[in-house]
Amino acid sequence: QLMENGVWTAYALDGLRSLAELLEGCRGDTPSDLALRGAICGALYQLVKPRRHGTLQTAACQTLETVQPESVVLLITEALHIGRLPEDALWTSCTVLETLVEKDARMASVFIARGGCHLLVRMLSRDAPQGFDGQDLRRAIASLVVTLADACPEAVQAFRSAGASKVLLEEGLKGDGADVEAAMWAIGAIDGLDTVLQAMRASGPVKPKVLLGGSAALTTCAFKASDREELQKLPAAIVLLLEIITNPGDEAKLQRVAVKALGCTLAALTPHAPPGHVPDVDRGVEALIQQLLQCPNKAKEAAEEAYKETWWNGDDGNDGYDVPVAPVAQAAAEAIGRIALTTSQWRPVLHRCSMEALLGWIRSGVPDRKLHKYLFWAAAAMSGM
């Protein structure tokens, strides 16, 4: 605490310049140097993230709008170059960088120009603890990789040059939690659909989180698919997603995420594949319709139970009508609506095969606001409205 207070005192005297001088003076490997570098990273985190009232940090620091984001990025990057940071300091560094890049995409170029992509790969391969203990850090690294790749096209090539996909496959998939999902998303952002499908085939049968993260990554890959080469790869994704939807296992969210990914994949392909021309596309659309043909009675019962539970637990601001009781049907309705909206050739088929099912869900009285929004939207899109 004394060291943290000293860092904030230095910041109060001369802002980020003081922190830069402190960082320059603690490049050694002594315990005090390591602790001071960690305290500097913690201070930068407090500058960027919302702060608690009544603390020394609140009194000493400015808002993000009055801090130079580029200077914060440079300080964090320099701290990472020095290395030997505690795990919590590595996590706060990733969080600071992601926050700044989300607010200003130009900060991605600042970080990348100073070897940031190689630093993250090194961090994942050498510094992140194995097993459960390193889950939060591995997730933060993978999330930052995705944010950088989205913000700056140069980041993708930089990560490829640094061997990021290989390290993500070897180190990022060792756990069994949200870090694995984030790693799959990062692999998709760097290497695209082929590598994601390979990882899902290789590791998915024993790691449901790989399938969950991979399905989310396929959604992004399908959104970005534009040229002929990318579109020709998408039927392979349909085949795998249909297998997951048929047998989702015990992972609660997997079927919903797979249906959403299937919908995005079909929305990219159906403008180029009229009904009856590509068997995998036809099978995919049929699978979406099948999700809506399931009886809504169970969903209605689940909604009633959710309403009772929220009522019994007291007034928490949730009246039970915002609980997603039919997430798979909602994802299917959203996908069907998107296909109908963008591809006129599919509208008659969708109208003939799924309109009655949509109306059945609407009439069922299932109290799920978001579900009803997509049901009505899909019905309108199929009607050409």
Image (cartoon, rainbow, N blue to C red):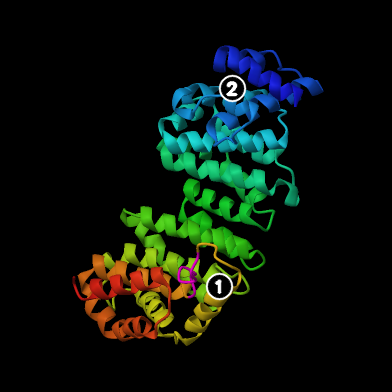
Residue receiving disc 1:
311
How many dots with numbers? 2
> Callout 1: helix, strand or loop?
helix
Look at 40% across and 76% down and name the residue there. 288
**In the rendered image of this protein, does residue 132 appear above or below residue 156?**
below
Front in this rendered view, residue 333 or 247: 333
Looking at the rendering, which quadrant does residue 204 occupy?
A: bottom right
Q: Nearer the viewer, mark 2 or mark 1?
A: 1
Residue receiving disc 2:
60
**In the rendered image of this protein, does residue 342 appear above or below residue 42?**
below
- 148 sits left or right of 166 in the view: left
Residue 264: image location, x then y, percent: 38, 63
State the residue lying farthest toward the right.
Answer: 31
**In the rendered image of this protein, does residue 322 appear above or below residue 300?**
above
Main SS of residues in magenta: loop
Q: Which residues are magenta?
A: 318-325
Q: CA distance from mark 2 to mark 1?
A: 44 Å
Is residue 324 shown to the viewer in this render? yes
For residue 323: magenta? yes
Looking at the rendering, which quadrant does residue 334 occupy?
A: bottom left
Residue 381: image location, x then y, percent: 24, 71
Residue type, numbered disc 2: Ala
Quarter occupied by the C terminus:
bottom left
**In the rendered image of this protein, does residue 115 appear above or below residue 339?**
above
Of mark 2 and mark 1, the one earlier in the sequence is 2
Q: Which mark is residue 288?
A: none
Q: How busy is the neighbourhood of tag 2: few (under 14 within 10 Å), some, or many (20 plus)?
A: some
Look at 38% across and 82% down and name the residue there. 361
Q: How busy is the neighbourhood of tag 1: few (under 14 within 10 Å), some, or many (20 plus)?
A: some
Is residue 41 shown to the viewer in this render? no
For residue 169: magenta? no
